Amino acid sequence: MGSHKDSTDSTDPFLLPTPSTRQGRDGLAALVARPGRAVIALDFDGTLAPIVADPEQARAHPDAVPALALLAPKVASVAVVTGRPAEVAVRHGGFAGVPGLEHLVVLGHYGAERWDAVSGTVTAPPPHPGVAAVRAELPGLLDAAGAGQGTWIEEKGRAVAVHTRRAADPQATFEALRTPLGGLAARHGLIVEPGRLVLELRPPGMDKGVALLDHVRETGAASVLYAGDDLGDLPAFTAVDKLRSDGTPGLLVCSGSDEVSELRERADLVVDGPAGVVELLTRLAAQLG
């Protein structure tokens, strides 16, 4: 977990890092003092799973599930908060049927879907009709915009995403598509959520911040840790800031990426990607005994 915001002694598996901010240090201290009233909330892609060119090939870091299984019984709740469909995150994460994760919750589609390990089922409202309309128009729009080879569409059920990571100039293609995709989304009552070389068209009203606030309030948590890596995680960071201003301590962790500097600057602690997140979770579980 080496970074300018991480002072962990890597030789001591029980030693926790020191967050760079007072609020972060207070959040970590509160979590350690009362783990039974703490929520651990984590993004999936880029946080628990390394970023890969094809999202269908994304899988949780091999040590992620063992770390979560050690930690989960010691805290009030572990929640995976993701833009992916909940069932996809469960499958790619390998979360189902794992001893220790009996009360894991996956909040998919930014909280529009909820999967509980207890029941093994997903609950969700009906899909937004604008998604089907956008899906039908999107190929023609990409052709008209000259998106070019390497730009591709990911079907996400309740949303649709356009990836530019495989394009000849990924960042230029990403920037060129923001305005036309924004117009398409607006015509059908959707919004565009930018991420790491991906633009997702999805219904408004739900984001990771809303999902996180709802879950923290539902559990009655007295502290919260949130870890993310992407622009879509900024609303969750804002939600933790709100909780802290209301008296609930929190710790903001960035799964380090040079692609999203804003998240790094707002974090109390930066770790080295999913491997660093797993190490943090493992040390936290060891610290809690």
Image (tube, grey):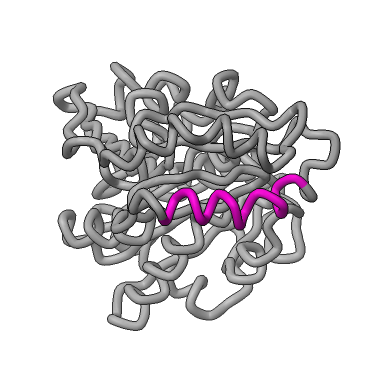
Q: Is residue 178 left or right of residue 100?
A: right
Instruction: Name, please, the residue furthest toward the right.
Output: 168
As drawn, 151 above or below 95: below
Residue 237 versus residue 160: which sits nearer the camera?
160
Look at the image and give the residue range highlighted in magenta: 173-186
Residue 6, given in percent of the width and then of the height, sits at: 68, 61
Residue 71, given in percent of the width and then of the height, sits at: 38, 40
* The image quarter in which residue 112 lies: top left
Q: Is residue 233 visible?
A: yes
> Which residue is at 66% across, 39% downward?
144
**Secondary structure mainly formed by the magenta segment:** helix
As drawn, 262 above or below 137: below
Q: Is residue 4 left or right of residue 228?
A: right
Is 178 colored magenta in this rendering? yes
As drawn, 25 above or below 195: below
Question: Dividing the image into 4 quarters, which one contains the C terminus?
Answer: top left
> Which residue is at 29% across, 16% downward?
97
Is 30 colored magenta in this rendering? no
